[in-house]
Image (cartoon, grey):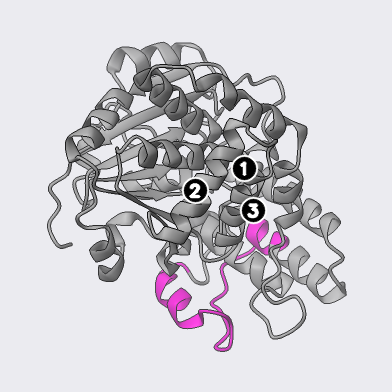
Amino acid sequence: MIRGDAPGSFARSVFHERHPVLVRRVLGALPYGPGQRDALERLLRESTDGVLEPPAADAPDAARWREWGEGHWGRPWGEAPFLWAESHFYHRLLEATGYFGPGAWRGVDPFAPFKDAELAGAAVDDELAALDGLDGLPDDRRARALLASAVWGNRADLGFRLTARDADPVGSGLLVDDGGALLAALDAADGGRVCVVADNAGRELLPDLVLIDHLLAAGRAARVVLYVKPQPYFVSDATTADALAALGRLRGAPARSAAAAVGDRLWRAVRGGALDIRTHPFFCAPLPFHDMPGDLRDELTGAAMTVLKGDLNYRRLVGDRLWPPTTPFAALTAHFPTPVAALRTLKSDVAVGLGAGTVAGLDATGTPWRTSGRYAVVQVAHPQAGPG
């Protein structure tokens, strides 16, 4: 189990390097009052040098968090599982800013200024304009290009970029490419339901939406269900508001552009039910997908494919552990209720499904290849999961 108490580890750096930067940015982005500012500073001190305190009886989701944290309360943050501790940190951050409270700050996304600035940036203009060059490609090449865009869009993670080194290039290091198998599986399903579990908003969600448009337009999916987070999470994770903002950005592209056409088609798809935007509380729970509740498992069951975007969903899918990186992807996803595809750039220590030669070559570079964001995977499995 990955924890945050190992000196020099990536997990420890998230709490001791990334989170202080994040809190400073949050405090600088919105005019929080003294009480909120003090609460955020206390959270930062507690999460780096303190112990985990159980929530008060009147705290948001207190009963669930007391249950989820059983065995962790009273212990240093670094001794808790990394996935659990990160989730708890972001829940506490929302609590500190008044997101759950009865006052005027209720429901205000503390990360919205970062998301809005990214979505409005010139880089997005260039990326949307590039869609015009794809219209003339053969269907298979176009599908693979859109799939690649969705994969590498996962690097557009505001939390990751808080401490990423500017010198790290995006690169083309696709370590596993099951993209052909993914498209073939969708074709064989002959227009079934595809579930897409989103990761980040903005520059990642835009190529996800473009890929969804392709799946619907090409008949690779009769219906797509896009799952987003029920509340702000991990800096840039997508909520319903973020999905609507991304749709608006597409529709606001220059008239007669490919991006505007995509936006209009998706808008109609949402209105007609071909694209269904949903959420579930479990997507903000500090638990792996192995522990998903029955109602969500029932929702997913029967889908032709579930596409999980991003690093966090990957950690939840295979388990946030230091698996030997040659551990088969299919073996760790057998619990999932549908065929599953992971589109992920590597930004944490978890890595599975890699060839021994690939691992040896990466280790020989002497670089932190698991966490640099320079490498990615497209992995597909067809588990035969039971009811639990």
The reply to whether dot 1 and dot 2 touch (C-beta < 8 Å) is yes
Element assignment for label 1: helix
Q: CA gap, disc 1 to disc 2?
A: 9 Å
**Magenta highlight range:** 44-72
- Farthest residue in the front direction? 256
Q: Would residue 37 be found to the left or right of residue 249 on screen?
A: right
Which residue is label 3 attached to?
245
Instruction: Answer few, some or many: residues within 10 Å of disc 1's Cα (few below 14, many 20 plus, some between 14 and 19).
Output: many
* Earlier-in-chain disc, 1 versus 2: 1
Q: Nearer the viewer, mark 3 or mark 2?
A: 2
The residue type indicated by label 1 comes to Leu
Q: CA gap, disc 3 to disc 2?
A: 13 Å
Q: Is residue 49 above or below residue 182?
A: below
Which residue is label 1 attached to?
250
Numbered tag placed on residue 266 in the rendering? 2
Q: Nearer the viewer, residue 366 or 238?
A: 238
The reply to whether dot 3 and dot 2 touch (C-beta < 8 Å) is no
Instruction: Tell me where residue 374 sits by quadrant.
Output: top right
Residue 12 point in image, percent of width and height: 58, 44
Q: Is residue 129 above or below residue 284?
A: above
The residue type indicated by label 3 comes to Ala
Residue 71 highlighted magenta (yes or no): yes
Q: Nearer the viewer, residue 291 or 268?
A: 268
Q: CA gap, disc 1 to disc 3?
A: 9 Å
Residue at screen point 43% across, 62% down: 278
